[in-house]
Image (cartoon, rainbow, N blue to C red):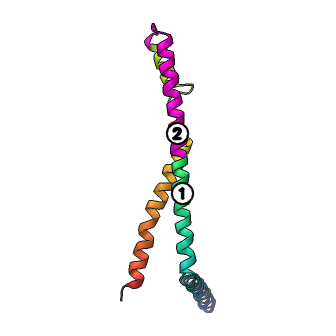
């Protein structure tokens, strides 16, 4: 009985200490964010512009590659008027059929992350301003 009480008291003390440490960390982080709100706002704006530029650059690069591919298909079809269906399929498919664009995937994932993260920031701001 005494041992069980000691264990319970020890666990309760550990729990309270852990909870106090978590609360201290939370409030410290919250204070840091509130004191540096302008810095974070400017930083997120810069990150947003950089992400948009990066997405535009990837889209432009993809557009150039698509144009080059279409040009090569057009040239092949002009030069060889008697192509078989399987040959045309090979030309259109390129070197790796079913391939996907890694830059397009990265741009989509980054945009999804930003779009998904923005509402959580808005909700936190509304909750903070509510009485």
Query: Measured along the vertical axis of the image, is residue 117 above or below residue 15?
Result: above
Q: Position of residue 5 (x, y in %)?
A: 59, 91
Residue 62 inside the magenta-drawn segment: yes
CB-based contact (under 8 Å), mark 1 and mark 2? no
On the rendered structure, is 77 left or right of 13? Answer: left
Query: Split into 4 quadrants, where in the image is the N terminus?
Result: bottom right
Q: Earlier in the sequence, mark 1 or mark 2?
A: 1
The stretch of residues the image draws in magenta is 58-85
User: What residue is rendered at 52% in x and 67% in y?
Assistant: 45
Query: Measured along the vertical axis of the image, is residue 75 above or below residue 103?
Result: above
Residue 131 inside the magenta-drawn segment: no
Secondary-structure class at tag 1? helix
- The count of marks equals 2
Label 2: how many Cα within 10 Å (few below 14, some 14–19, many 20+): some
Query: Measured along the vertical axis of the image, is residue 17 above or below residue 80?
Result: below
Label 1: how many Cα within 10 Å (few below 14, some 14–19, many 20+): some
On the rendered structure, is 73 left or right of 129? Answer: right
User: What residue is rendered at 42% in x and 78% in y?
Assistant: 125
Secondary-structure class at tag 2? helix
Q: Which residue is mark 2?
A: 62
User: What residue is rendered at 54% in x and 79% in y?
Assistant: 38
Q: Position of residue 56 (x, y in %)?
A: 51, 49
Query: Split into 4 quadrants, where in the image is the C terminus?
Result: bottom left
State the predominant SS element of the stretch in magenta. Answer: helix
Q: Which residue is mark 1?
A: 51
Query: Measured along the vertical axis of the image, is residue 66 above or below residue 2?
Result: above
Residue furthest left as drawn: 131
């Amino acid at each position: 009985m005494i041992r069980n009480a000691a264990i319970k008291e020890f666990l309760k003390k550990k729990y309270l200490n852990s909870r106090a440490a978590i609360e201290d960390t939370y409030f410290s982080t919250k204070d840091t964010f509130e004191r540096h709100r302008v810095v974070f706002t400017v930083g997120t704006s810069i990150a947003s512009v950089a992400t948009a530029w990066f997405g535009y650059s990837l889209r432009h690069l993809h557009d150039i590659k698509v144009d080059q591919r279409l040009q090569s298909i057009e040239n092949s079809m002009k030069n060889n008027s008697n192509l078989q269906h399987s040959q045309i399929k090979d030309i259109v498919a390129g070197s790796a059929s079913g391939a996907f664009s890694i830059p397009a995937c990265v741009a989509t994932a980054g945009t999804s992350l930003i779009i998904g993260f923005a509402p959580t920031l808005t909700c936190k701001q509304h909750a903070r301003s509510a009485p």
